[in-house]
Image (tube, helix red, strand yellow):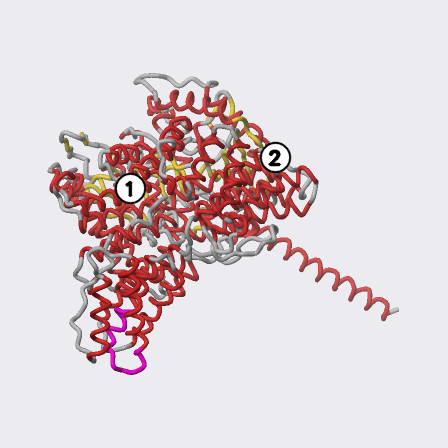
């Protein structure tokens, strides 16, 4: 990828203050500036400028040079070295200038250029931490600058940094910001040549980011447009080639790559890597390998001493080729060299070693990919040679890949980027778990299963886990209240702009709003960087979050709960069962067959037609046998099942499975769900009568309709919230404002209203309040920002609040997930559109059972059973009327009664001890009497 264009396409010139120092140095400085700013610069003008600037800085100790002149001279020397390709010299010059920072005679704004340029130079040197540091220092000075050109260059450079670290969503925001600052709004043909080149570069960067996000059609649209620019067609052909390779169309990919004829372009790493990847995808392994090795030999790459992540990609491809050729020894070595070149700091040539210190470096995704390739190669070597050292090295290398991905994810500042990273790493988790379970002789069974379930659960809901943990840490990690308030204000502003965009039809107004949205998002990003300057906050959020299975078994699970954790591999599905005593794993079938049965089951339930009677013995019984049949004997020992679904099982109502051809599973067990073991906590039960309870029924006698949506009356919604026996907001009182004012102080919240999921953009899903217009809708991105840490339960009695797009690692991106993010430990939500009357019935019985002391899971089970056993509600016995309600929640904390058997044993031993002493004393007294 050629993102380094920004070093030459934006001018290095900055406005210089008028000179006023001693005549000799002032004259040399002005002469140097004249050569530096030559209209047609040549090697000679650059050389003369360099010599004169060196003479100026040589007089630094004489105190005859004004400080700002000295700073500017160092900056210009750095730029000349940069243009000449001497990156180390450039860094030295920029650093000399920045050492003047404590000089009170220099305005802070004058250090902007040196920070920007040294940051860009460190990028070229593959020094990620240094590059990020100096670019962020430049960003702090932006408010002092008045130049859009300078700001644009900085934002573009930051976009490049975000791109290389894998945060492609934020990279696009920075590229758009950079573009908006300097590109006039005229049509392309009306632009000056300078702006045409600039626009090309910005759109190229955006297109490349979209390609990395897998949005190939959007990227293709951009590059087809860029072909018409008649600028740098080689770059466009290269990107079109990558798009078609991503689309798994290697012939079209090679077609566009062959259009590149420039020797300079052909003879570089990027081109050769791209060609090799195409040949690899076409199965031409020897040709791909020979081409790369010849290129490396010609360019000294095999003995390259300085880390270069372009070279890291070359070694990675060689590793993939060697792996496919079953040359696993060389594969390990190639992948190890790729890790060294990509990481930039790690340089240990021992293949059994991996990076120990992690940072938010460049090419994060490529580094993880090479680590995974190395791990797989070690496992294959173990299989081939039966060497335990290779097995241990493989597992350790997998763990390093997962740890690096987890560490980097903590520094991503948006949910979308974290989810993308989680989905990317999931495939490696699947390979690692599969490895543990198929190589049965490598470790004892218990060790393998415990490690497998730890990896399984670490792969799930990573973004939700990070977001929830950060939310808690912000309150206790020393972040100033003023900064937290600023974050809240920015989040509110972003939400308002997003709502205005949804309601706006005029193209010009939309453009302005999109620009404002980008600005606010980048401002929020800068604020989050300030949070990361607080050591305690960073230390806590990057702290290892390994799963303590023993603690979960001993302190969270009770004797009545069996935890069922599912994990989807590429071709089959696993079921882990976990209780207080043991963890077992079972293979429950191949994925394709199971997927077909699940689809049939959903059609049977959701495809209900009025008056249809449910017939037992069909898909519900088949699914029970396939999914839970292998552990059915174990199920009989437990009252409560805690389900952690995955993949194709993500939105299944388990309680509507048929445990026999005439009985729903709900009659055997209470069932609740959780996102991941990482989020499983014990929940302190509270006195329901004393809790602050709030209910909303905005559509009890109200409706709303416009050209896009029809929100009907919900006549039974009033009954739902009346059964709560708390504060009620009905009809016109059920406003978004009243909800926002009461939510943070409520312990139980019941929302009986309308909701609308958005699988295409989960951030735009919403719950509706009175009256129903766009201003009264609570969007998912707003729910994320709520503080519901005081809440015990949110009951979302609205349509499809547990429905949304499916992330491979994160699960369903639903409205209910947003409430979990906001801090609520227990959420009842709906899988499909709810029927008003039956839901009101279940709600009433649910709260009655909770008031009588049942847990949320038990109360929901009993409420559903009440419905199914009530002959007056016979028309609602079909699962479509009750199985839609699911509880995502925590396990009630253990009470005295849970430990009672232990106490009884202790008491028995004490009594036994006293009895022994009494008998002993009696015999002792008898012997004395005798």
Q: Which residue is mark 1?
A: 204
Question: Residue 217 appears at what percent x and percent y?
Answer: 31, 31
Residue at 68% x, 57% y is 909
Q: Tell me which numbered mark, 2 or 1, is placed earlier along the sequence.
A: 1
On screen, residue 525 above or below 655 = below
Q: Is residue 216 above or below residue 93?
A: above
Q: Quadrant of the C terminus?
A: bottom right
Horizontally, is 555 left or right of 883 in the view? right
Which quadrant would residue 849 be assigned to in this image? top left
Magenta-colored span: 59-73
Judging depth in this view, the residue of 640 and 425 nearest the camera is 425
Task: Check residue 90 in the rendering and tell me which mark sits there, or answer none.
Answer: none
Res 150 quadrant in image: bottom left
Residue holding disc 2: 326
Which quarter of the figure is the N terminus placed in? top left
* Residue 149, x across and y down, in percent: 20, 55
Helix, strand, or loop for circle 1?
A: helix
Q: Is residue 153 magenta?
A: no
Residue 815 at what x, y percent from top left? 31, 40
Name the residue nearer the viewer: 434 or 777: 434
Magenta part, dominant SS: helix
């Amino acid at each position: 990828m050629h993102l380094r264009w920004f070093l030459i396409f934006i001018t290095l010139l900055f406005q210089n203050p008028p000179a006023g120092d001693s005549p000799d140095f002032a004259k040399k400085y002005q002469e140097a500036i004249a050569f530096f700013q030559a209209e047609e610069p040549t090697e000679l003008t650059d050389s003369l400028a360099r010599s004169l600037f060196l003479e100026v800085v040589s007089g630094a100790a004489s105190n005859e040079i004004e400080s700002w002149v000295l700073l500017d001279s160092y900056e210009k020397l750095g730029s000349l070295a940069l243009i000449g390709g001497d990156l180390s010299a450039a860094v030295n010059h920029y650093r000399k200038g920045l050492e003047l920072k404590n000089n009170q005679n220099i305005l802070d704004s004058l250090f902007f250029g040196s920070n920007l340029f040294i940051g860009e130079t460190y990028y070229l040197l593959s020094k990620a931490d240094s590059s990020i540091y100096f670019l962020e220092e430049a960003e702090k000075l932006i408010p002092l600058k008045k130049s859009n050109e300078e700001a644009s260059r900085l934002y573009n450079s930051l976009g490049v940094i975000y791109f290389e670290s894998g945060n492609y969503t934020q990279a696009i925001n920075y590229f758009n910001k950079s573009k908006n600052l300097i590109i006039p709004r005229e049509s392309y043909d009306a632009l000056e040549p300078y702006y045409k080149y600039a626009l090309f570069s910005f759109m190229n960067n955006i297109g490349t980011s979209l390609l990395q996000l897998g949005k190939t059609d959007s990227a293709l649209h951009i590059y087809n447009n860029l072909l018409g620019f008649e600028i740098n067609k080689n770059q466009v052909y290269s990107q079109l080639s990558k798009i078609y390779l991503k689309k798994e169309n290697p012939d079209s990919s090679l077609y566009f790559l062959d259009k590149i004829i420039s020797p300079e372009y052909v003879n570089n790493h990027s081109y050769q890597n791209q060609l090799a990847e195409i040949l690899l995808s076409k199965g031409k392994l020897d040709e791909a390998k020979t081409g790369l090795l010849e290129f490396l030999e010609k360019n000294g790459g095999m003995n390259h001493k300085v880390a270069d992540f372009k070279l890291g990609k070359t070694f990675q491809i060689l590793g993939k080729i060697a792996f496919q050729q079953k040359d696993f020894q060389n594969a390990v070595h190639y992948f190890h060299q790729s890790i060294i070149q990509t990481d930039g700091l790690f340089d240990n040539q021992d293949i059994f070693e991996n990076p120990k210190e992690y940072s938010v470096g460049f090419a994060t995704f490529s580094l993880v990919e090479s680590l995974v390739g190395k791990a797989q190669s070690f496992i294959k070597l173990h299989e081939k040679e039966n060497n335990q050292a290779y097995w241990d090295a493989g597992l350790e290398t997998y763990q390093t890949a997962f740890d690096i991905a987890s560490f980097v994810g903590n520094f991503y500042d948006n949910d979308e980027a974290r989810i993308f990273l989680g989905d990317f790493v999931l495939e490696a988790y699947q390979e690692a778990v599969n490895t543990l379970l198929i190589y049965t002789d490598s470790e004892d069974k218990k060790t393998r299963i415990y490690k497998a379930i730890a990896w399984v659960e670490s792969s799930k809901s990573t973004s939700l886990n990070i977001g929830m943990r950060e939310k808690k840490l912000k309150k206790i990690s020393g972040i100033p209240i003023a900064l937290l308030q600023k974050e809240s204000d920015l989040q509110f502003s972003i939400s308002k702009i997003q709502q205005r965009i949804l309601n706006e039809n005029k193209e010009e107004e939309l453009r302005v709003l999109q620009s404002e949205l980008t600005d606010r998002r980048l401002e929020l990003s800068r604020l989050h960087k300030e949070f990361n300057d607080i050591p305690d906050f960073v230390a806590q959020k990057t702290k290892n979050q390994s799963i303590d299975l023993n603690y979960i078994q001993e302190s969270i699970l009770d004797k009545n709960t069996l935890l069922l954790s599912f994990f989807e591999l590429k071709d089959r599905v696993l079921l882990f069962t976990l209780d207080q005593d043991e963890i077992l794993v079972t293979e429950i079938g191949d994925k394709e067959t199971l997927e077909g049965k699940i689809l049939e089951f959903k059609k049977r339930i959701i495809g209900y037609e009025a008056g249809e009677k449910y017939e037992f013995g069909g898909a519900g019984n088949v699914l029970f046998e396939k999914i839970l049949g292998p552990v059915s004997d174990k199920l009989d020992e437990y009252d409560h099942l805690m389900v952690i679904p995955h993949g194709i099982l993500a939105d299944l109502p388990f309680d509507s499975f048929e445990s026999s051809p005439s009985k729903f599973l709900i009659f055997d067990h209470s069932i609740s769900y959780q996102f991941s073991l990482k989020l499983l906590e014990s929940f302190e039960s509270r006195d329901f009568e004393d809790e602050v309870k709030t209910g909303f029924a905005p559509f009890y006698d109200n409706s709303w309709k416009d050209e896009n949506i029809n929100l009907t009356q919900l006549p039974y919604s009033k009954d739902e919230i009346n059964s709560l026996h708390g504060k009620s907001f009905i009809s016109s009182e059920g406003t978004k404002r009243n909800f926002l004012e009461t939510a943070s102080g409520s312990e139980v919240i019941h929302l009986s209203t309308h909701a609308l999921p958005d699988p295409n953009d989960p951030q735009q899903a919403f719950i509706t309040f009175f009256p129903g217009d766009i201003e009264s809708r609570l969007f998912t991105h707003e729910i994320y920002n709520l503080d519901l840490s005081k809440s015990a339960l949110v009951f979302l009695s609205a349509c499809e609040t547990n429905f949304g797009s499916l992330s491979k690692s994160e699960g369903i991106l639903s409205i209910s997930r947003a409430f979990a993010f906001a801090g609520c430990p227990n959420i009842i939500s709906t899988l499909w559109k709810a029927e008003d009357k039956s839901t009101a019935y279940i709600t009433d019985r649910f709260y009655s059972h909770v008031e009588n002391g049942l847990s949320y899971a038990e109360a929901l089970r009993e409420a559903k059973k009440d419905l199914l056993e009530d002959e007056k509600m016979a028309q609602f016995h079909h699962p479509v009327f009750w199985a839609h309600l699911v509880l995502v929640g925590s396990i009630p904390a253990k009470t005295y009664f849970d430990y009672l058997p232990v106490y009884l044993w202790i008491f028995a031993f004490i009594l036994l001890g006293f009895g022994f002493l009494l008998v002993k004393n009696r015999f002792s007294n008898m012997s004395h009497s005798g």
